[in-house]
Image (cartoon, grey):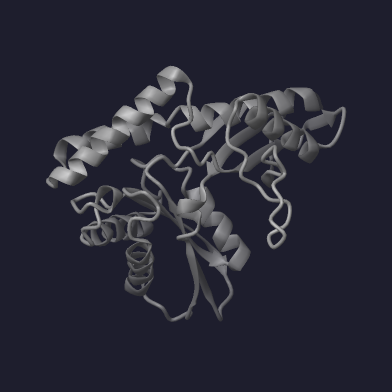
Amino acid sequence: MREISVDVIADTVARLCVRANTVLSPDIGIMLESCAETEYSDAGRGALSDMVENFKYAAAERLPICQDTGMAVVFAEIGQEVHITGGLFSEAVDEGVRKGYVEGLLRCSVVKDPLRRVNTNDNTPAMLNVQLVEGDRIRITVAPKGFGSENMSAMKMLLPSSTPEEVIEFIVETVKNAGSNPCPPVIVGVGLGGTIERAALLAKRALLRPIDTRNADEFYAKLERKALDRVNQLGIGPQGFGGRYTALAVNIDAAPTHIAGLPCVVNMGCHVTRHASAVI
């Protein structure tokens, strides 16, 4: 049994909050640079060039890539041979978010109650998702989620007889309805199966996958490629100015489900779908 202090956990989360908000994942950065070179729309190409300049400047100056520094979504894979000492894991995560956002001068965007709308002033609580795994390590991923993209997400209880084409139609419909709101080119996370909450979590996790990595199951990999092609045929383009690149990737994750249903959740990520990870 390996002991890990809540202080170490809090410090790690704080560091990840700042890093995720200021340093774009290399795979996304490389893709944006490539798109900026090949976009046929003059306005779209200009928007992409601005995006590239923005994320490079943010990293160099340690400034937020986007003014919406998001709600802190935290994924934790906790090894079963870990003993957490000094307090509760959830409280350590929230302390890390508090420290990261306040001391890192990141915008605090969380309200304590969805209807009374009073800001917590420290961006807590985090949206914490915990999974027990083998080993004596903790892997933590902080994925700040802005609501320009989150608001454009959608779910649908498809019929169990629904075809792959109908799944693609729902994905395309969701992106079309979103238009320029989620700051395209977007990354589209899709969760299929499970129950409604499992599908939503699958969709959110799918946004963390490297955008140049397809589903390991060729059936779904083919579906991802076809969906991406259909989405980019919409012509919404970078920041809605028109062009070739409405989306950078469509990532689909699936899970077993009930014989009577087919939950489908589409979670939209903006062109800076942020996340940073560390292993303790």
State the residue at coordinates (35%, 69%). 173
* Corner quadrant of residue 131: top right
Residue 87 or residue 159, whichever sits in front: 87
Left or right for 257, reference 122: left
* Corner quadrant of residue 229: bottom left
State the residue at coordinates (56%, 78%). 259
Looking at the image, is 137 positioned above or below residue 38?
above
State the residue at coordinates (62%, 27%). 279
Q: Residue furthest top?
A: 60
x and y percent of residue 213 in the render?
37, 42
Looking at the image, is 17 positioned above or below residue 213?
above
The quarter of the image holding the N terminus is top right
Left or right for 121, reference 180: right
x and y percent of residue 180 in the render?
33, 55
x and y percent of residue 75 in the render?
62, 42
Q: How many marks are shown on the rendered structure?
A: 0
Looking at the image, is 220 positioned above or below residue 107?
below
Whether residue 78 is visible here, answered yes or no, is: yes
The quarter of the image holding the C terminus is top right
Looking at the image, is 188 positioned above or below residue 37?
below
Residue 260 or residue 151, whichever sits in front: 151
Whether residue 280 is visible here, answered yes or no, is: no
x and y percent of residue 48 in the render?
25, 39
State the residue at coordinates (66%, 39%). 76
